[in-house]
Amino acid sequence: MTSLRSIALSAAALVILTAGGCTTYYTVSDVATGKTYYTTKVDRENSGAVKFVDEKSGGTITLQSSDVRKVSKERYEEGIYANPAPTAPSAPTAPAAPTPPAAPAPKS
């Protein structure tokens, strides 16, 4: 009886460990804007929209038109921890030229 109990406990432990490592990673792209979000769970609404929690911002997002793709854990983590691309610095602006004094009004 002890060996049967040991086998059952070992099987239960294996199921728990295996289930914990089965996370699926997704990128969700907004077709309208091209913005990409990262999540581990995507819910489909009755309207056809997708609803998920964006892992970068923590916000709940609902998109009517999206592209959902499974990605590797590595790609997911790259996206989550990537810094946004730096924006190009704007060109320095020249100081405004001084306004010339107004011409005197003609005498009548």
Image: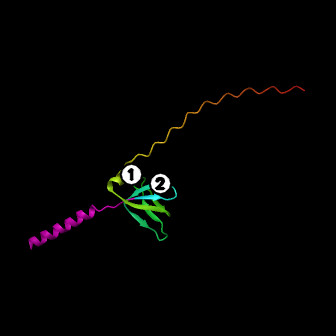
Q: State which quadrant residue 54 falls in.
A: bottom left
Q: Counting other residues with Cα less than 10 Å from the Cα at mark 2, is it few (<14), some (14-19), or many (20 or more)?
A: few
Residue drawn at (36%, 50%) of the image: 78
Looking at the rendered image, the quarter that the N terminus falls into is: bottom left
Tell whether 2 sits left or right of 50.
left
Q: Position of residue 40 (x, y in %)?
A: 36, 60
Residue drawn at (23%, 62%) of the image: 17
Q: CA distance from mark 2 to mark 1?
A: 12 Å
Looking at the rendered image, the quarter that the C terminus falls into is: top right
Secondary structure, magenta segment, majority class = helix
Range covered by the magenta-colored residues: 1-26
Q: Earlier in the sequence, mark 2 or mark 1?
A: 2
**Per the image, is 60 magenta?**
no
Front residue of this view, candidates 54 and 93: 93
Amino acid bearing label 1 = Gly
Front residue of this view, candidates 58 and 91: 91
Q: Element type at marker 1?
A: helix
What residue occupies the far bottom of the structure in this picture?
A: 1
Q: Which residue position holds label 2?
A: 35
